[in-house]
Image: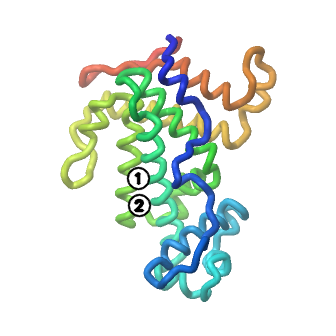
Amino acid sequence: MNDAPSRRKALTPSKHPAEVAKSPRDKPYHHGSLPHALLDAAELVLRRDGIRGLTLRAIAREAGVSHTAPQHHFGDTAGVLSELAASGHRRLASVMADNAAGTEPGQPRRKAIARGYVSFARANPALLHLMSRGEMLDATRPSLVEARRASARALAGVFDEEAAANAEDGSGAFSRIDAAQAIAMTAAWAYVHGLALLLIDGRLNALANSAEGIENAEALVDAAIEHVQVISAAPGKSKARSG
């Protein structure tokens, strides 16, 4: 199947402002903006030094503040990392929505959402890894709970736009999803997230280089998204096929 609108939104890094790496302090901050400055510094440290280098002292040093400032605003290392992960989930949801905007419903929209997910991963590999490191995060932190739900709702559109729209009730909890829909949404999530991780971890480079007609790993992932057809189904029925 040739979905031209979806093809036009291929796996190029999104230009969404939230994805652009910035200096933690492009201009002086006042006290009210210090938490934001600390999170910007944390992301810069994460990009540069990886998860192992992401300590409270390193974040404070990058932001140019007292080493006690991160603890004062976020409580502990898990608090800082959880807020940074929450920011990542909100940005991921926004990138997927932006990538799917204006795309016709059905397969083109689902593929655009999937490509948005992979695009975010390419632009933010270290952040995506942090977002997946549950043992380092405070899963009960309200901002992280809500941000994870936001990205899950956006990703649910890979399976079914209607299911995504009905995926939460007034309290923010997932509801009105039958077992078959939950299984299909889980499969879609695993597929897209798995592609993203294989790409940013460099696991597909050798395979792409050995395949005729495949330019690089990014093109291979794009073709894989095009290959799989996730079929919207009535409640209790869902299926996926390739080709």
Q: How is the image coloured?
A: rainbow
92 and 57: which one is in front? Answer: 92
- Where, by quadrant of the figure, is residue 163 drawn? top left
Q: Is 155 situated left or right of 129 in this image?
A: left
User: Label 2 crowding class (10 Å Cα cut-off): few <14, some 14-19, many 20+?
Assistant: many
Question: What is the x, y in percent for residue 156?
Answer: 37, 36
Which residue corresponds to the image point at 52% horizontal and 39% vertical from the top-left? 117
Q: CA distance from mark 2 to mark 1?
A: 6 Å
The residue that mark 2 highlights is 144
Disc ID at residue 148: 1
123 and 98: which one is in front? Answer: 98
Q: Is 228 situated left or right of 239 in this image?
A: right
Give the amino acid at mark 2.
Answer: Leu
User: Label 1 crowding class (10 Å Cα cut-off): few <14, some 14-19, many 20+?
Assistant: many
Which residue corresponds to the image point at 67% horizontal and 25% vertical from the top-left? 220
Q: Is residue 16 above or below residue 198?
A: below
* Number of disc labels: 2
153 and 203: which one is in front? Answer: 153
Question: What is the x, y in percent for residue 90?
Answer: 43, 54
Give the amino acid at mark 1.
Answer: Arg
Look at the numbered discs 2 and 1 and tell me whether their residues touch, using CB distance below 8 Å: yes
Question: What is the x, y in percent for residue 33?
Answer: 47, 77
